Amino acid sequence: MSGNLVTQDMLKDLNYDKSKISTQIEKNELTDKVTTVMVVFEHSDINAAVYHLSKSIEKPQSFECGAIATVLVEECIKDSFTKKLQMILKCHHMPDNNDNNFKKSIEILKRLNANTINFNNNNGRPIAIVVNGFSHEHLGGNYVNGIITLHAFRTSKECAALIKKESLEFACATIWHENHSYAYELIGAAKCKLFYVNCFCVNLMPLKSKLSTSESYVTMDERYHYETFPCDGVQKSVIFPIGSIFAN
């Protein structure tokens, strides 16, 4: 596995200057829809993935490129992943979720007797719910602020099938695996236009001038590799940190 994994202590002091990024992303044509799917494999920086999910749960619209609405986790790390998420959110102050659709979803989940993980604020009120084994279709088919569906998978093929079963059309995906070949397998199968590999909420301006074309393009800045290319009639864009591991 790669070195320099993000630790829990490092995450406590990790901050994002989202103001500049958000302004740029709001104007980006990749963001015509508002939701993101997260995929986490066993061999990945789980702490970093959990951190990004926790930030999306705190403020579902804080990432202008799309709140994380569905999470797919490799089966062997599902328990560890959810425990880490619960641990990090215990330390966060979270405001009330007054979305009427969220309140309706709570009642639907009760009727379904769904297995859920509830995240409450300091007043004991639920602000977000992770739902095991159900899709957004069971909750009305639309994205509801604060509802995250969670699925376990064993293979990349099964993972791609689960993404397609969701009723939401995801604007982007954030994929966590240290071997890029696994990520690119999903990139080819999923219908998203934008893919973050081992990162999330990254400045998209280096690709902005190329998004309306149907050509392949690669560029880099000091921290990230950017590329865009046509695939099955869709212009797909991929971003990953420079120095992350390629498959041999």
Image (spheres, grey):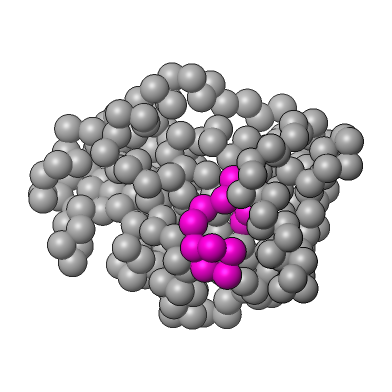
Image: magenta residue range: 137-148
Can you name the residue that lies furthest to the right here?
123
Residue beneath the point at 41% across and 55% down: 170
Q: How many marks?
A: 0
Residue beneath the point at 51% across and 24% down: 18
Q: Is residue 152 visible?
A: yes
Q: Can you say whether 111 is above or below 223 in the image?
A: below
Q: In which quarter of the image is the C terminus?
A: bottom left
Rendered image quadrant of residue 129: bottom right
Q: Could you say which is closer to the camera, residue 112 or residue 78?
A: 112
Q: In which quarter of the image is the N terminus?
A: bottom right
Rendered image quadrant of residue 82: bottom right
User: What percent of the width, then of the height, locates residue 146?
Assistant: 64, 47
Apparent side of residue 43 relative to residue 169 in the rendered image (left or right): right
Apparent side of residue 11 relative to residue 16 in the rendered image (left or right): right
Q: Could you say which is closer to the camera, residue 229 or residue 6?
A: 229
Q: Can you say whether 109 is above or below 53 in the image?
A: below
User: What percent of the width, then of the height, locates residue 144?
Assistant: 57, 50
The answer to whether residue 217 is magenta is: no
The answer to whether residue 139 is magenta is: yes
Rendered image quadrant of residue 79: bottom right
Apparent side of residue 78 relative to residue 238 in the rendered image (left or right): right
User: What percent of the width, then of the height, locates residue 172?
Assistant: 40, 51
Residue beneath the point at 66% across and 57% down: 105
Residue beneath the point at 64% across and 73% down: 133
Q: Is residue 40 visible?
A: no
